């Protein structure tokens, strides 16, 4: 309650559109929408949407110190006013036609000794009871509980004794309170406890909070504290009380009343009002003197006091309902969520809603969810057919690719780009590069030349660097005896690079014909023509273009290009040269453009070809390997590598290979796209293990695995792990679970029985089994039967799987024999809590219909203990 | 029951009647320019002209003006020939019933604490200075006597010392330097003569917010009443006595005045009991009493307690004053008579 004459504000407990402002008088307002037809000239705007209309003013009660609104529906607008002299007056605003109201209005409750009334509180249940907290008097009580229905007792105020009191004659005075509490102390604030309406919490001057029970007033619980102003009970949690003193708020739990549960950070200025939000759990608003902000404390997740001394989590924030003015008081709206009206010292009012904090969560499948107040919003990606593949989020793409087994084709490696959707040129280039690398390695293996195997994976950049013994040839245009003035370079490394580019298949002789054929088949006419031209076969190029023009959906313009091409002359100043070098820029097809650029450029100056970014890197690199000399070539490759790394362009993997450079490139690719899936699969192919040890690579792999887990793609995760362990044996997890025999204590898995007298070697169960002909349902060590399945009552035991290999060489082979593993249905399963179990298949089917353990008399809810047990994988096996 | 040693260090002074003019300014400052907040101690005070004095009491008697105030307020009083200062620092004690006190006894004020505080302190020869207000009773003791006081009262009370807004429990061991008598002579209790003037007194309070409303009246009554000049000498057969007390302690105002003075104030502002009770005064002492004699309060409060008569008790620089309900005056007179006879 405010002191002095600063206005305070009170909401009607039952009418969501009425409130009272009290300063020197009481004014009743009705709040309504602004600009509605019923708003008249006299309304005060409260916000953009709302305005207040003054309904009534009551100035009958001077020296108001505190006001409390009658809590029941009827009479509607009855107010108790505590005055400076300690009298409590019942008054009303607006309608007074109600008879009960008439009877009560004007009634005064007079304490024996006059002193200020600090606080008033109606009993929430027995609404005839009104508690008044008064200042200290040496011989009187500070808390008086009045019964407003009590009959007048004029005889208790003898006339001759009433010389000093004013209006005894009115006959509306009540002087005998129902209860008197708290002698020799002042009461600064009080409240009824909602749990038990006979109990009253009051705060006294002598720095204590006390709980009185009216049924036995001599008994009380009390605690010494400084925080004795403004006690207020949390409406959502009747054991939680806030009280304050100066700038400090203490939060109490009445069940553990010895000390505050916690105190809020102290404010530099004294607090004037502290109020729990009635519409939102655990939200406390505080106001300090001469301030224009209201501080909010969100105690949503504050732990209960019984537990350990955990530091509570309180979210503190502040709101500024009106920027220009300081706030005198505020009041929460009783029903509209988070809404309050604030009033400034000069009675300017403001309707204000505290915006709820938004908490936001992404699902693992690109939908977004956020909560604000009591609303929950979901936002999902537009999955309609209209959405172009390129516009899809990378997470959606990765999910789709994981479902199509992307990355798992280890035989025809290039096919992985088809699995990825086949629409990404970078992925296409990447997988072809990896494919050619693998192909070359296999060829080498056949030829038993393994010295170059590591080189092939280190990319063209390194291959070219190691180049030596380059020879230079000048060849004739094929089908013509004209000598070209273009030198062509040959070396073993250059032809290796051409192989990686996919221009030639194998061997030292450069025969691009198969490549041209395949391009023709795919309808890449321009590219095929360019490749033919670069191999100095104009006739073949023209032939390809003609073919392209006559093909189905062929571009007739190709014939025109072919005509232009056929006019080629090497004369420097010919009209053909001049026109071609300028008009080629207007050609839309990059490959056609570079063909003329090649024909019209000076020897050794092929920048127009080399830096034509629309042409695939592999074609440009192949071109460079053919026509750049030993000084130009590494410089060009270095430059291109740098560009690719900067851009995170996967075509650059051709240059960097799976080296540290390649990881750098992949890093910028992942930074750009977030595609950890491609990064993981690509780096797993790197045969030198160094790249796999790179922490970045490990990070991508772990993130991809987590992603699969988050999507509940557990089977995919398992497949990935298997794939990974094949390529990177060091990633194979160590066995974590063993089954030991109840009788001999030895592991029931194969390895210990195979070497019976070598202690207790354990190996992963299920992967291995007994090789001997003994029954699988008995321990291989002591031959005693294994435990029985709780459901089928058969002895457990997994049928023999493959014998564990002894050498590393067998390890890969071991994994490929998946089919020999025991069926999952026969695996051992048991509850870690009750230790009952049986065959995995039986257990699964049991818990589909039951929650309790199948063993009779065991009440363990085994499946519910497993947090992931009830989750269903979203990829079927 | 709790006994609180309050966080004030007080000086007891007196201003002579003739020197009042010189002190009008500081006194008006002390009365009116106080900080407006009720709760003590922890304010953020920005207005420097405000006096930080939190304990102030001014009592006019025919002899002089007694001013009891804390050290902050004492700074305002310039030393002069008209200002007499008692040498010691005094600490106020306050008994808090804790709400457990039985409400059977109607007797209030000094009577209530006569047996539990006043009498034991008198036995230990601790000199006390009493100051009753509308709100409570303060028992002032010298700071140097505190150890003995705590030792004496620890049996009956939980003793707390208030420091910076916190109540800190005090244990007698902390304060005790060996329990010994106060080391003073134990003179046989002298029975002082008493004077019972004819005025009727009332004890009142006031909402501090409305203090400005009565400011002119208050200034008039305190500083410009010429009543004292009319009969400056006090003699046995005078009928009325000049007595007016104003105190402002921790934001609470208390006024003691006779019905004559009360008429000058607006009726609706002053608080008093709804029964409108009136009090008669018993002034103790024929000679100025001084500050060292013990047992003065005890010798009057004890019999009042025995007969369950409530009382206010206001010590001043020269004499002590007890206020008793007018209807009990007869029995009090009789009681005092018996006491004189027996001694």
Image (cartoon, rainbow, N blue to C red):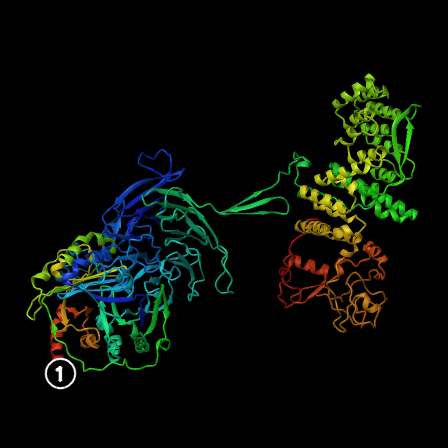
User: What is the residue that sits farthest to the top in this orientation?
Assistant: A575
Q: Position of residue A82 (x, y in %)?
A: 27, 54
What residue is drawn where x is 89% and y is 49%? A450
A397 relative to A72 in the view: left or right: right
Count of numbered circles on the image: 1
Q: Position of residue B262 (x, y in %)?
A: 14, 58
Disc 1: which residue: B342
User: What is the residue that sits farthest to the left in this orientation?
Assistant: B237
Please tell me which residue lies in front, A99 or A392: A392
A85 relative to A192 in the view: left or right: left
Please tell me which residue lies in front, B226 or B162: B226
Q: Which quadrant of the structure image shows residue A605?
A: top right
What residue is drawn where x is 82% and y is 34%? A624
Q: Position of residue B311 (x, y in %)?
A: 19, 70
What residue is drawn where x is 11% and y is 70%? B196
User: What is the residue that sits farthest to the right in this orientation?
Assistant: A481
A734 relative to A259 in the view: left or right: right
Say whether residue B253 is visible: yes
Say whether residue A209 is visible: no
Q: Position of residue A85 (x, y in %)?
A: 23, 56
Q: Which quadrant of the structure image shows residue B251?
A: bottom left
Please tell me which residue lies in front, A201 or A315: A315
- Provide the secondary structure element on which disc 1 rests: helix
Q: Is residue B306 positioned above or below A6 on the image? A: below
Q: What chain does mark 1 sit on?
A: B
Tell me if mark 1 has few (under 14), some (14-19) or many (20+) residues whose alpha carbon lies within 10 angstroms of its own. Answer: few
Q: Which quadrant of the structure image shows residue A750?
A: bottom right
């Amino acid at each position: 309650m405010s002191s002095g004459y600063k206005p305070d504000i009170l909401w009607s407990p039952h009418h969501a559109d009425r409130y009272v402002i009290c300063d020197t008088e009481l004014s009743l307002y009705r709040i309504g929408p602004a600009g509605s037809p019923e708003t008249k000239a006299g309304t005060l705007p409260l916000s953009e949407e709302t305005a207040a209309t003054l309904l009534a003013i009551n100035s009958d009660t001077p020296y108001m110190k505190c006001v409390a609104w009658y809590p029941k529906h009827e009479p509607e607008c009855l107010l108790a006013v505590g005055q400076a002299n300690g009298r409590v007056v019942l008054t009303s605003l607006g309608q007074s036609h109600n008879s009960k109201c008439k009877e009560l209005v004007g009634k005064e409750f007079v304490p024996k000794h006059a002193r200020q009334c600090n606080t008033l509180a109606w009993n929430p249940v027995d609404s005839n009871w009104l508690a008044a907290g008064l200042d200290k008097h040496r011989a009187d009580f500070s808390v008086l509980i009045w019964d407003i229905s009590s009959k007048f007792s004029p005889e208790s105020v003898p006339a001759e004794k009433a010389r000093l009191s004013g209006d005894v004659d009115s006959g509306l005075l009540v002087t005998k309170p129902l209860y008197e509490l708290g002698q020799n102390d002042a009461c600064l604030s009080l409240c009824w406890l909602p749990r038990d309406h006979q109990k009253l919490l009051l705060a006294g001057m002598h720095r204590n909070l006390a709980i009185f029970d009216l049924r036995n007033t001599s008994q009380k619980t009390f605690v010494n504290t400084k925080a004795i102003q403004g006690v207020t009970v949390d409406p959502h949690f009747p054991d939680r009380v806030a009280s304050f003193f100066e700038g400090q708020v203490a939060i109490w739990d009445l069940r553990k009343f010895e000390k505050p549960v916690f105190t809020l950070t102290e404010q530099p200025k004294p607090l004037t009002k502290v109020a729990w939000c009635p519409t939102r759990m655990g939200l406390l608003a505080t106001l300090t003197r001469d301030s224009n902000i209201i501080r909010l404390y969100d105690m949503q997740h504050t732990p209960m006091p019984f537990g350990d001394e955990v530091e509570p989590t309180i979210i503190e924030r502040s709101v500024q309902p009106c920027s220009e003015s300081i706030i005198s008081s505020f009041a929460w709206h009783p029903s509209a969520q988070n809404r309050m009206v604030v009033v400034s010292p000069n009675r300017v009012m403001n309707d204000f809603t505290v915006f709820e904090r938004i908490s936001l969560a992404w699902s693992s499948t690109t939908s977004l969810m956020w909560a604000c107040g009591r609303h929950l919003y979901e936002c999902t990606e537009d999955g309609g057919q209209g959405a172009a593949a390129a516009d899809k989020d990378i997470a959606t793409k990765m999910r789709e690719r994981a479902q199509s087994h992307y990355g798992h084709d280890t035989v025809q490696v290039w096919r992985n780009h088809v699995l990825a959707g086949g629409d990404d040129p970078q992925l296409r280039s990447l997988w072809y590069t990896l494919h050619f690398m693998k192909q070359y390695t296999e060829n080498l293996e056949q030829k038993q030349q393994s010295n170059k195997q590591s080189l092939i994976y280190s990319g063209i950049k390194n291959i070219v660097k190691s180049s030596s013994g380059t020879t230079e040839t000048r060849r004739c245009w094929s089908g013509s005896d004209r000598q070209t003035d273009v030198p062509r370079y040959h070396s073993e490394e250059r032809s290796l690079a051409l192989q990686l580019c996919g221009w030639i298949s194998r061997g030292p002789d450069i025969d691009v014909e198969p490549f041209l054929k395949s391009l023709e088949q795919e309808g890449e006419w321009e590219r095929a023509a360019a490749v033919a031209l670069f191999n100095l076969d104009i006739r073949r190029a023209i032939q390809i273009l003609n073919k392209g023009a006559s093909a189905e959906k062929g571009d007739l313009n190709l014939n025109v290009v072919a005509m232009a091409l056929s006019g080629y002359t090497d004369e420097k100043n010919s009209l053909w040269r001049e026109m071609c070098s300028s008009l080629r820029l207007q050609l839309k097809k990059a490959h056609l453009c570079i063909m003329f650029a090649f024909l019209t450029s000076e020897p050794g100056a092929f920048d127009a070809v080399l830096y034509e970014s629309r042409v695939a890197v592999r074609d440009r690199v192949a071109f460079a390997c053919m026509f750049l000399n030993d000084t130009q070539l590494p410089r060009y490759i270095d430059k291109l590598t740098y560009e690719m790394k900067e851009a995170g362009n996967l075509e650059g993997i051709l240059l960097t290979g799976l080296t540290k450079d390649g990881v750098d490139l992949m890093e910028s690719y992942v930074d750009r796209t977030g595609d950890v899936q491609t990064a993981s699969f690509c780096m797993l192919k790197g045969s030198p293990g160094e790249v796999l040890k790179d922490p970045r690579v490990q990070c991508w792999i772990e993130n991809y695995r987590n992603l699969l887990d988050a999507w509940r793609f557990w089977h995919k995760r398992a497949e990935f792990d298997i794939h990974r362990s094949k390529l990177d044996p060091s990633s194979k997890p160590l066995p974590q679970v063993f089954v030991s025999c109840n009788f001999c204590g030895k592991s029931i898995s194969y390895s210990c029985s195979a070497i019976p007298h070598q202690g207790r070697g354990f190996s992963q169960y299920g992967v291995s089994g007994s090789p001997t002909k003994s029954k699988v349902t008995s321990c291989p060590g002591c031959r005693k039967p294994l435990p029985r399945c709780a459901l089928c009552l058969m002895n457990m035991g997994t049928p023999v799987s493959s014998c564990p290999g002894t050498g590393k060489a067998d390890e890969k082979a071991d994994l490929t024999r998946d089919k020999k593993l025991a069926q999952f249905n026969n695996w051992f399963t048991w509850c870690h809590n009750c230790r009952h179990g049986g065959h995995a298949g039986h257990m699964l089917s049991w818990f589909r219909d039951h929650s309790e353990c199948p063993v009779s008399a065991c009440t363990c809810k085994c499946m519910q203990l497993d947090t992931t047990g009830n989750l269903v994988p979203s990829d079927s096996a | 029951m709790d006994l609180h040693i309050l966080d004030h260090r007080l000086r007891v002074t007196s201003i002579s009647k003739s020197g009042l003019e010189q002190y009008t300014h500081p006194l008006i400052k002390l009365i009116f320019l106080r900080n407006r907040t009720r709760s003590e101690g922890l304010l953020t005070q920005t207005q420097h002209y405000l006096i930080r004095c939190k304990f102030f009491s001014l009592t006019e008697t025919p002899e002089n003006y007694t001013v009891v105030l804390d050290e902050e307020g004492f700074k305002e009083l310039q030393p002069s020939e008209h200002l007499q200062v008692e040498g010691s620092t005094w600490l106020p004690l306050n008994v808090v019933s804790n709400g457990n006190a039985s409400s059977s006894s109607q007797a209030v004020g000094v009577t209530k604490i006569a047996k539990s505080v006043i009498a034991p302190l008198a036995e230990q020869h601790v000199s006390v200075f009493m100051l009753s207000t509308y709100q409570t009773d303060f028992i002032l003791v010298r700071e140097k006597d505190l150890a003995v006081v705590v030792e004496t009262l620890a049996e009956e009370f939980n003793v707390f010392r208030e420091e910076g807004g916190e109540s800190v429990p005090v244990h007698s061991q902390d304060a005790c330097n060996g329990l010994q008598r106060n080391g003073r002579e134990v003179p046989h209790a002298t029975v002082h003569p008493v004077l019972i003037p004819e005025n009727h007194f009332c004890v009142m309070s006031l909402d501090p917010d409305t203090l400005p409303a009565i400011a002119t009246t208050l200034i008039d009554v305190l500083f410009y009443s010429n009543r004292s000049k009319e009969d400056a000498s006090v003699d046995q057969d005078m009928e009325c006595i000049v007595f007016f007390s104003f105190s402002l302690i921790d934001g609470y105002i208390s006024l003691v005045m006779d019905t004559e003075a009360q008429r000058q104030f607006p009726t609706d502002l002053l608080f008093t009991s709804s029964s409108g009770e009136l009090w008669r005064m018993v002034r103790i002492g024929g000679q100025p009493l001084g500050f060292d004699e013990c047992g003065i309060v005890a010798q009057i409060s004890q019999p009042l307690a025995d007969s369950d008569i409530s009382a206010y008790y206001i010590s001043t620089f020269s004499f002590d004053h007890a206020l008793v309900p007018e209807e009990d005056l007869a029995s009090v007179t009789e009681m005092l008579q018996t006491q004189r006879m027996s001694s």
